[in-house]
């Protein structure tokens, strides 16, 4: 009875009504909180996507999947400006209008061009929303009733517009429009960062492609001589794999030294702040090195670019040209002297022959005249060989007897060899067939080999011998005419054996050798399709095998 009276009193006073209203208000607040949480999650997701390398279509789709939890949405579109046009860049659901320009008569262009946000109710004014793209209206085709358009702003500049639509009429109010505007701001930042990221990535790729395309080695080196970056050129030559990647010191990986170079240009660049140039000889090769400082915005040098250019062949060519010019001058002088000597030698031989004829063979003095005539003829032969060797030709390949070339060279330098008490031991195979070659160049190679053998015997206190032989050998299924020059001199060590054909590498004193003889000889051999092989041991002598192919086609050497 009491409880019934209490219920009647509560109903009359509105207590139950207040509780119901309170619960309904709490429920509405919870729904609003959920909506706000969803909106914050969407904004947070956009912020996360700023640092992710995603396409705009993927970002729009990801936002669209969560957007209905925050605002009514069954269409999300993104239009961006490109070359004074507004292009529908992405849309979910995907529409035929993607990739096409927006008409200037549409309200979307109006929002973009006038930088104003728009709320459009399609029920109230269907004509207000004109076709978006070339007559294709995604709003109309999807049956949208409400559309919100918000311009995208980056540093006070409009870069496009965001379109949100739903099939529900009057779906968007001030609250929804404000959230869409916040979402558009975050999306604009995301788009700008994506654009900047692509530009930087493209610039980085172009720079790296350019860096690696340079055939010369380029290095970025810090103050501690550490190689920070290189373009991977000539890695095998520079020996980069031999050292740990965290210990790439320039003096080790480039110059193969255990300590920094003396008067290192790197230190000069850091001290002066200006570029430097050096020409460096290293292990028989010559390099032009260029050092350029890399500076911070405050002008402080943080690293140095080293550009290494191998100019060995260039220097070799220049040296050969100078050497050829000297040889040409010497040849002209030798030819002049030879001509001057040729006339008196002819008189001496002729006079001796006439005296011998007048005396008759019974006269014992006739033997003396035989010696005069024999030595005179030998001198004339030497003069003829000297004239032939000094004569400039066109270096055509012709049928050449290698044994004849050996005899001509020996007649020229026999005296230089014999005066050093060196025995020349010949073992020439006169059945060796002729080859296509240039005789003058073969003589040059043989002279270089003989003079090197003579120099190797200089410190030899015992018997000094040079062996010269010719033969035909079969190597790698090919027939070769082989000229061998062997000596029992000082020999060559393993380290020098790997470098003897490098231009300008020499173990002789500066005044005694240029380091070009063997390099030029190998070049002549290769131009004939052949090669030079060497075997040597310290204290036991050296053997050089000058190999030329037996079968060749004619041409220019």
Image (cartoon, rainbow, N blue to C red):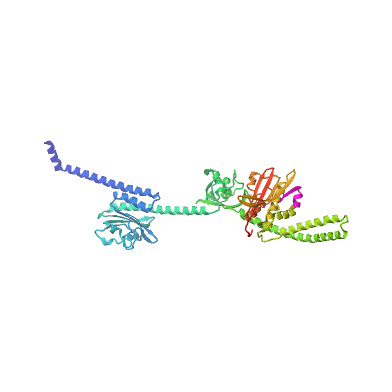
Q: Is residue 424 magenta?
A: yes
Extreme residue in the bottom direction: 105
Quarter of the image with the C terminus in it: bottom right
**Which quadrant does the N terminus fall into?**
top left
Name the side, left or right, on which 299 lies relative to 137.
right
Q: How many marks?
A: 0
x and y percent of residue 546 in the render?
66, 51
Q: Is residue 80 left or right of residue 444?
A: left
Q: Report x, y in % for residue 419.
A: 77, 49
In this rendering, position of residue 354 left or right of residue 405: right
Q: Is residue 385 at all visible to an observer of this figure?
A: yes
Q: Is residue 58 magenta?
A: no
* Along the line of sight, the residue nearer the viewer: 114 or 285: 285
In this view, the residue in front, 278 or 491, is 491
Give left or right: position of 222 versus 490.
Answer: left
Give the camera-side residue of 435 and 291: 435
User: Which span is picked out in magenta?
Assistant: 414-428
Res 186 visible = no
Outermost front residue = 431
Residue 389 screen position, x and y as percent: 71, 58
Q: What residue appears at the point 26 percent right and 58 percent down from the top-left corner?
A: 122
Counting from the top left corner in percent of width and height, residue 498 is at 63, 47
Residue at the image point whose x is 22% and y is 45% from the top: 24
The residue nearer to you, when weighing 305 against 270, is 305
- The residue lying furthest to the left in this view is 1
Residue 462: quadrant of the picture? top right
């Amino acid at each position: 009875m009491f409880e019934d009276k209490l219920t009647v009193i509560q109903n009359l006073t509105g207590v139950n009504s207040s509780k119901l209203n309170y619960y309904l208000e709490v429920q509405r607040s919870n729904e609003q909180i959920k909506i706000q949480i969803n909106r914050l999650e969407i904004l947070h997701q956009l912020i996360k996507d700023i640092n992710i390398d995603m396409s705009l279509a993927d970002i729009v789709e990801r936002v669209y999947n969560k957007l209905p939890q925050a605002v009514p949405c069954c269409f999300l579109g993104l239009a961006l400006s490109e070359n004074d046009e507004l292009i529908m860049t992405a849309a979910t659901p995907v529409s035929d209008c993607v990739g096409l320009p927006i008409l200037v008569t549409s309200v979307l262009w109006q929002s973009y061009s006038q930088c104003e946000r728009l709320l459009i109710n399609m029920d109230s004014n269907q004509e207000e929303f004109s076709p978006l793209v070339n007559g294709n209206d995604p709003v109309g085709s999807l049956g949208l009733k409400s559309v919100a358009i918000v311009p995208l702003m980056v540093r006070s500049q409009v870069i496009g517009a965001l379109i949100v639509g739903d099939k529900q009429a009057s779906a968007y109010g001030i609250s929804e429009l404000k959230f869409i505007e916040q979402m558009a701001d975050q999306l604009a930042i995301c788009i700008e960062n994506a654009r900047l990221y692509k530009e930087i990535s493209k610039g980085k790729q172009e720079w790296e492609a350019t860096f690696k395309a340079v055939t010369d080695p380029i290095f970025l080196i810090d103050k501690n001589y550490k190689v920070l970056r290189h373009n991977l050129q000539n890695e095998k030559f520079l020996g980069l794999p031999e050292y740990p990647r965290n210990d790439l010191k320039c003096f080790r990986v480039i110059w193969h030294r255990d300590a920094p170079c003396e008067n290192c240009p790197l230190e000069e660049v850091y001290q002066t702040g200006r570029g430097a140039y050096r020409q460096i000889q290293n292990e028989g090769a010559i390099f032009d090195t260029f050092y350029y400082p890399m500076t911070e915005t405050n002008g402080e040098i943080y690293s140095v670019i080293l550009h290494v250019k191998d100019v060995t062949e260039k220097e070799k060519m220049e040296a050969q040209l100078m050497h050829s010019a000297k040889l040409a001058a010497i040849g002209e002088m030798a030819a002049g002297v030879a001509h001057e000597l040729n006339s008196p030698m002819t008189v001496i031989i002729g006079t001796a022959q006439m005296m011998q004829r007048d005396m008759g063979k019974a006269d014992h003095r006739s033997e003396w005249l035989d010696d005069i005539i024999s030595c005179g003829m030998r001198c004339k032969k030497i003069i003829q060989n000297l004239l032939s060797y000094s004569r400039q030709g066109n270096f055509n390949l012709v049928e050449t007897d290698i044994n004849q070339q050996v005899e001509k060279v020996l007649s020229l330098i026999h005296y230089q060899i014999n005066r050093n008490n060196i025995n020349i031991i010949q073992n020439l195979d006169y059945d060796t067939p002729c080859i296509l070659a240039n005789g003058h160049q073969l003589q040059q190679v043989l002279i270089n080999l003989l003079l090197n053998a003579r120099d190797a015997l200089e410190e030899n206190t015992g018997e000094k011998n040079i062996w010269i032989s010719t033969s035909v050998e079969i190597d790698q299924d090919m027939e070769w005419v082989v000229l061998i020059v062997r000596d029992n001199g000082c020999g060559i060590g393993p380290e020098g054996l790997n470098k003897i054909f490098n231009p300008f590498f020499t173990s002789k004193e500066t005044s005694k050798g240029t380091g070009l003889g063997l390099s030029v000889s190998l070049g002549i051999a290769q131009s004939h399709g052949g090669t030079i092989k060497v075997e040597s041991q310290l204290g036991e002598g050296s053997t050089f095998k000058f190999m030329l192919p037996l079968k060749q086609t004619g041409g220019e050497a």
